[in-house]
Amino acid sequence: MEILSFDVSSGRPAQAHGSVGVTAQALLRGDVVAVTVLHVAAGGEVGRHPAPVDQLLMITAGHGVVQAGSGDWESVSAGQAVVWRAGEEHTTRAIADITAVVIEMVAMPLRRGS
């Protein structure tokens, strides 16, 4: 057994794409899937960038807004998830501190409904 820590102090500052107030803790990096925990401080932002592969952002705490392309800003909060497909430009802003789990993989199969 191994216990992994992913609190804010375990992460590394993420400044790519002009990101501000973001820390990231990679939990898993494989050939097929990557799992990262992001912390975005209130007022912080994950800078606009194209998704390199399909991405699922699962918000576990906090709330903010997300945008894809030049579309409208959409509110998101704990208990919601956002999917961006490979190549889709997107950004995330935190209104209150956000903790999120990001899963990245090629051609992510999503199951909708229960």
Image (cartoon, rainbow, N blue to C red):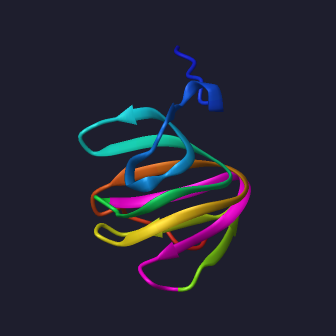
- The quadrant of the image that shows the C terminus is bottom right
On the image, the x and y values in percent for residue 78 come to: 72, 58
Please, is residue 47 above or below residue 1 in the view?
below
Q: Quadrant of residue 85?
A: bottom left
Tell me: 28 left or right of 87.
right
Query: In this orientation, does residue 64 appear?
Result: yes
Secondary structure mostly taken by the magenta-highlighted segment of the chain: strand
**Residue at 54%, 30% in the rendered image:** 11
Image vertical order of residue 27 relative to residue 73, above or below: above
The location of residue 23, given as percent across then percent down, is 54, 39
In the rendered image, is residue 7 in sight?
Answer: no
Nearest to the observer: residue 5 or residue 68: 68
Image-based side of 44 in relation to 97, left or right: left
Percent x, y of residue 57: 52, 57
Q: Relative to 23, does residue 10 appear above or below in the rendering?
A: above
Report x, y in % for residue 112. Answer: 53, 72
Q: Quarter-wise, where is residue 45 in the image?
A: bottom right
Residue at image location 23% in from the left, 40% down from the top:
31
* Residue name at image x 56 percent, y 85 percent: 72
State the extent of the magenta-drawn residues as a range: 54-71
